[in-house]
Amino acid sequence: MKTPIKVTLTGAAGHIGYALAFRVASGEIFGPEQPVILRLLEMPQAMSSLNGVGMELEDCALPLLHDVVLTDDPSIGFRDADYAILIGAKPRSKGMERNDLITENARIFSAQGRAINDNASPNVRVLVVGNPANTNALIAASNAPDLDPRHFTAMTRLDHNRALGQLANKTNSLVVNITRMTIWGNHSMTQYPDVGNCLINGTPALERVTRDWAIDHFIPGIQRRGAEIIQARGLSSAASAADAVVDHVHDWALGTPEGDWVSMSVASDGSYGIAEGVFFSYPVTIKDGEYEIVQGLDIDDFSRNRLDISRNELLSERAVIEELLP
Ligand code: NAX
């Protein structure tokens, strides 16, 4: 029997957490041979609801789930964690300015960065989902001085998967036959979904769709997809967000397929002219739990402009929380 992997989920009683916990516990991320221990962290006022999630997990009698810890104490929630998935965040309330939202979340994520630093496994891998995800990842990583900043990431996999779905739909092809999709930049309206390198059954996607379609429909469609879901459901994406977490962590742990890549927001090393340290979504390949940013892709003037817009937004977010960076 393998040693269980300890996975911490914050905001586990929320919509995404509820959709995700059962999938982690049933083995969808680490496979059917790998037991897991779930550590579910919530706010004190959500503990009753979290207890309900705990009861339902117990009622599933999942063979791979060896233990569940329910807590509102970060030092317990992050204890010995191998993976920490940070979903809980302060939502935007009526009348709240964007900068206030960034600052309030920066406070939460700086405290969580410190708690992860002090309590988690030294090799913990951290995925930030709660928005503004890229800047929250920056602040968490900056407050975890003993941990490798390369082990902190933010989620743009939902955008990546949305882009695969839209391209498959447009070209009447299967998502499994599409490779090399890329989301560049921030998980926000400035993100740049890029079909320029995509292959469909090994041939360039741009032989099947026009540049005009990409510019006028595809890019804005992916940028606005979250709002479109809210409009339709009256609630933000939850099942698809949980699904993207499963994909992100699965590929981080087990690697990307030969010849393909995925989109992940990672600390920039200066690749593609992005300021070092900023959490920027790049195409990455993954092997043995370590990602590499795909190098050498052609960036034309249109793409350069899109990358720069998103980089500038991330720099302005960083400026808002500068005083919380150690
Ligand atoms: P919910 O409001 O349903 O759930 C959030 C949960 O987090 C609540 O139960 C709350 O009590 C808890 N929480 C808040 N602060 C916490 C803290 N400091 N420690 C522990 N728990 C805390 O939101 P949900 O729909 O689950 O979305 C969660 C976050 O994901 C939001 O910030 C949302 O904007 C973000 N998203 C990010 C996506 C991405 O692709 N990166 C896509 C989906 C989603 O929009």
Image (cartoon, grey):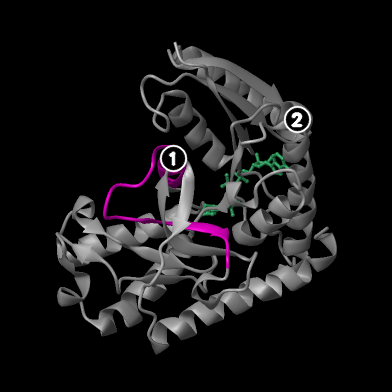
On the picture, is 51 further left or further right than 199?
A: right
Q: Quadrant of the C terminus?
A: bottom right
Q: Residue at x 39, y 58 (%)?
A: 160
- Residue 210 appears at what percent x and percent y? 21, 81
Quarter of the N terminus within the rendering = top left
Side of 296 relative to 35 (left or right): left
Q: Is mark 2 within 8 Å of ligand 1?
A: yes
**151 inside magenta stretch:** no
Q: What is the distance, in whole Å, between disc 2 and disc 1 at their CAs?
A: 33 Å
What's the residue type where badge 2 is placed? Answer: Asp
Element under label 2? loop
**Front residue of this view, candidates 64 and 267:** 267
Q: Amino acid at mark 1?
A: Asp
Residue with the mark numbered 1? 288
What's the magenta region?
A: 242-269
Q: Nearer the viewer, residue 3 or 182?
A: 3
Q: Which mark is residue 72?
A: 2
Residue occupying the point 33% across, 73% down: 218
Q: Who comes first in sequence, dot 2 or dot 1?
A: 2
Residue 310 at x, y percent in the picture: 55, 75
